[in-house]
Image (tube, coloured by chain):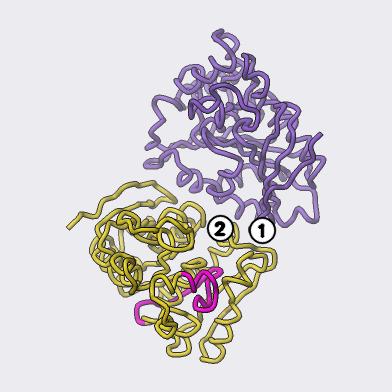
Chain colours: A yellow, B purple
Amino acid sequence: MMELECVAENRCFAGSVRRFRHFSNACQTPMRFAVYLPPQAQKERLPVLYYLAGLTCTEETFLIKAGAQRWAAELGLILVAPDTSPREARLPGDDAHWDFGMGAGFYLRAAQAPWQQHYQMYDYVTEELPALLAQEFSVDATRASIMGHSMGGHGALICALREPQRYRSVSAFAPVSAPGQVPWGEKAFTGYLGEDRQAWAEWDASRLVLRQRFPGEILVDQGLADPFLKEQLRPEIFSAACAEAGQPLRYREHAGYDHSYYFISSFMEEHLRHHAAALQV
Amino acid sequence: MMELECVAENRCFAGSVRRFRHFSNACQTPMRFAVYLPPQAQKERLPVLYYLAGLTCTEETFLIKAGAQRWAAELGLILVAPDTSPREARLPGDDAHWDFGMGAGFYLRAAQAPWQQHYQMYDYVTEELPALLAQEFSVDATRASIMGHSMGGHGALICALREPQRYRSVSAFAPVSAPGQVPWGEKAFTGYLGEDRQAWAEWDASRLVLRQRFPGEILVDQGLADPFLKEQLRPEIFSAACAEAGQPLRYREHAGYDHSYYFISSFMEEHLRHHAAALQV
C-alpha cells in the first residue's frame, strides 16, 4: 500500500494548495489529486467541495485557473480536484485521442476491456477519495458537495443523481448534458461501456434524472458563445428531462461567454456560495 | 505597417480578455500583448494598469493565473500584460537559456549585438504600447500605473523610477530587487548591456532609486518561502536603498508564501486597490 505522497504544496489565501499522489484501489494504479485547505482547516473540521474537471485537464487545472481559493478561504470550504483519468497505468491507445482515454475518464465505471482494469473513476471519486480525505484531513465527511465543468460537469451531475445521499448540493459549468446523444459521449460510452445503449442509461444525467431526483436545486451555468454548445453540450435535453421529472433546476444562460476558465472564473463565487449555503446548514 | 490583430477574445467578468499581435516599431518584430477590458470600458475612458510578468511567462500568464479580472471589473481598471520578450524574430541562442533571451527580456534597452536589434522592451512597454492603447481603446492615457512579478516586478520598478511622470503608482511581487548583484541579473545585463557595470546603473532599481525617487509609496510583497529570495531577489538591498534615498516603501513579508501565482493571487486584490486609489483621484 502506497503512502499518500504530497508532491507539491503552495501557500494560498492563508491556506494551502497541496497535490498528492497515492495508489488507488479503485483504479489499480497511482492517481493524483489536488486539495485546497483554507485557513480554518487548522482549527475545525470543514465541509468538502469536489470539482471534476473537463477533457484534457489535470488535477492542477482548477486550482490554477478558476479563482476559487479566494472564496473557499472566505467560506471555509475544502476544495478537492481529482485528475481526469488514470495516467500511470498505460493502456494501448490511451493517448491516441484527446477526448477518450487519458484525460477523458468521464467519471464512470468502465466495463469494456482493457479500460475496466483502471478506468473506475466513479468509484474513485465517490468512494475512495472521500474515505481517504476523511482519514487524512480535518474533513467533516457528512458534509460534501460536488461541481464540475464540461465532462466533469456531467460527472458531478451523475454522482449527485446516482447517490444523492452523498452530496448536499451539485452544480455544473457547461456540462455535457446528455452524453448518450452527442459525439464526445457516444465515443466515450462505446469505448468504456460497450455498444449496448441500454447500459448507458445509468451514466447519462438526462436519463438518470428521469429515474431519481436530486433533493435540491441543481445549478447549471452555460455560456451562449460556447463553441461546443449545440453539438456536444445540449443543455436543452437535460432541462427537458428535469422538467419532465420535476427536478428543480436553475439553468442560467450567459451571453458572450465561451467554454474557457475565463467563463468559469466569472461565476465561481456564485457557485461556491450556492454550495456553502447547502453545506453550512 | 501591420494591423493590430486580435488573436483571441474571451468574455470574463462581464468584460473581455483579448490577446493581440502587432508589429512593434520598438522591437522591430511582431509582439503580443493581452488586455482585460472591464464592462465599464464600453461607456467611459478608463485608467490602465500594466502588469509585467516574470521569466518564462507570456502575455497570457497573468490573465490566466492571477485572478485580477474580478477586481479590475469591480474597480474599473483596464489591465494590460505584454509578453516578456520578442519571440518571432529569432536570434542565435535565444532559446538556449530559460533566464536569458526569449521569455527573459528584462524590460530594458539592449545595447549589445545581436540583442539590440529586437530586445527593446523598455521602449515597447513605456512608450509604444501606451500610445497604441490610447489609439485603439477607450483609455484615459493620463492615468496609468504599473506592477509586475519577479523579473517583471523589477521591470515595473525601473519604469516607475525612470519615468515617474508616466505612472501614478507602482507595485511588485517578489521583484528581482537588485539585478546588478544577483545571478539572473548579472547574466541578463552582461548579455544585453555588456560588461561595463557602470552602464547597468540606469537599469537597476536599487541604484536608480538613489538618483530619483518615485512620488508615492512603492508597494512590494514578498513570500518568505520563496526559493529565490536569498540568491536572486534580495529585497533587503532595495529596502536599504529606499531608506537611504528617502523613498517611501511599503515592503511586506508573508510567511509561508513562495514565488508562484498562488502567492500573487492571494494579494492581487490589495494591489489592485492600491493602484485604483491612485488612479481614481
**Residue where numbered disc 2 is placed:** A261
Q: Quadrant of the C terminus of chain B?
A: top right
For mark 1, name the chain. Answer: B
Residue B19 horizontal side relative to residue A37, left or right: right
In the rendered image, the vertical position of residue A50 relative to residue B265, given as above or below:
below
Q: Which residues are magenta?
A: A165-187
Check the picture and name the quadrant holding the N terminus of chain B: top right
Q: Nearer the viewer, residue A252 or B156?
A: A252
Name the residue located 75 percent from the left edge and 47 percent from the top edge: B46
Compared to residue A199, the image places residue A121 above or below, namely above
Q: Residue at x 20, y 55 (%)?
A: A2
Q: Is residue A157 magenta?
A: no
User: A105 or A135, which lies in front?
Assistant: A105
Q: What's under tag 1, amino acid-wise?
A: Arg
Give x and y (percent) for residue A216. 47, 83
Q: Chain of mark 2?
A: A
Q: Which class describes the residues within 10 Å of circle 1: few (<14), some (14-19), or many (20+)?
A: many
Q: Secondary structure at mark 2?
A: helix
The residue depicted at 38 percent of the width and 33 percent of the height is: B227
Occupied quadrant, residue B278: top right
Rendered view: B26 above or below A214: above
Distance between the alpha carbons at the discs numbered 2 and 1: 10 Å
Q: Is residue A158 left or right of residue A117?
A: right
Q: Residue A42 versus residue A262: which sits nearer the camera?
A: A262
Task: Give the quarter of the image for residue B160.
Answer: top right
Q: Which residue is mark 1?
A: B11
Name the side, left or right, on which A49 lies relative to A5: right
Q: Position of residue B267 (x, y in %)?
A: 51, 46
Amino acid identity at mark 2: Tyr
